[in-house]
Image: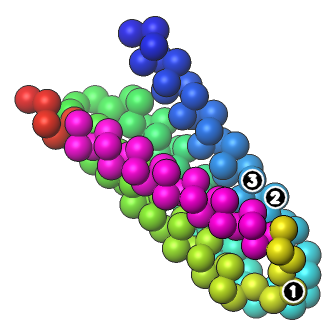
Amino acid sequence: MKDRNKKIKELEDRLLKFALEIIELVHSLSSKKSNLILASIFTQVIKSSSSLGANYGEVCEAETKKDFEHKIAICRKESRETRFWLRLVLLGAKSISNLEKEKIQLLGNEAREFNLIFNSILSSSKKKK
């Protein structure tokens, strides 16, 4: 049980760090006037990335197996959505440095890893009866 709680805490911390990194990235990109047109996309990527951690908190408090599976599926969807918005930012942002491109790609990879984690959790849960 101790190992499970440690894994839960580690994932919660990782999700929080991810959302904060997205906020920092958006702040740096939105400070460039050429990227102001992407304001709604920036809002979406912040919402979906921060939703991951919030929804994972709901997963940890699920009342039934069905509730658990539903909430973990939401986390999986949010991770896919975040990855989509990051890809759109990468393709749509102007005056973006190589360092910013690299950061976006790293965050996109992290979103993909979250998707794989949530998918694995969901698959394992559905196998258990």
Badge 3, how many Cα within 10 Å: few under 14, some, many 20+?
some
Badge 1, how many Cα within 10 Å: few under 14, some, many 20+?
few
Tell me the SS state at disc 3: helix
How far is the residue under mark 1 from the one under mark 3?
A: 19 Å
Residue drawn 75% across the image and 73% down it: 101
Question: Which amino acid, by three-letter code, is at mark 2?
Answer: Glu
Q: Which residue is mark 2?
A: 24
Residue 127 is situated, as x and y percent measured from the top left of the image, at: 13, 36
Front-lying residue, 5 or 40: 5
Q: Which residue is mark 3?
A: 21
Highlighted range, magenta: 100-124
Q: Which mark is residue 95?
A: 1
33 in relation to 5, above or below:
below
Tell me whether circle 1 and circle 3 mark residues in contact (CB < 8 Å). Answer: no
110 sits left or right of 76 in the view? right
Which quadrant is the C terminus positioned in? top left
84 sits left or right of 70 in the view? right
How far is the residue under mark 2 from the one under mark 3?
A: 5 Å
Question: Which amino acid, by three-letter code, is at mark 1?
Answer: Ser
Residue furthest out toward the left? 129
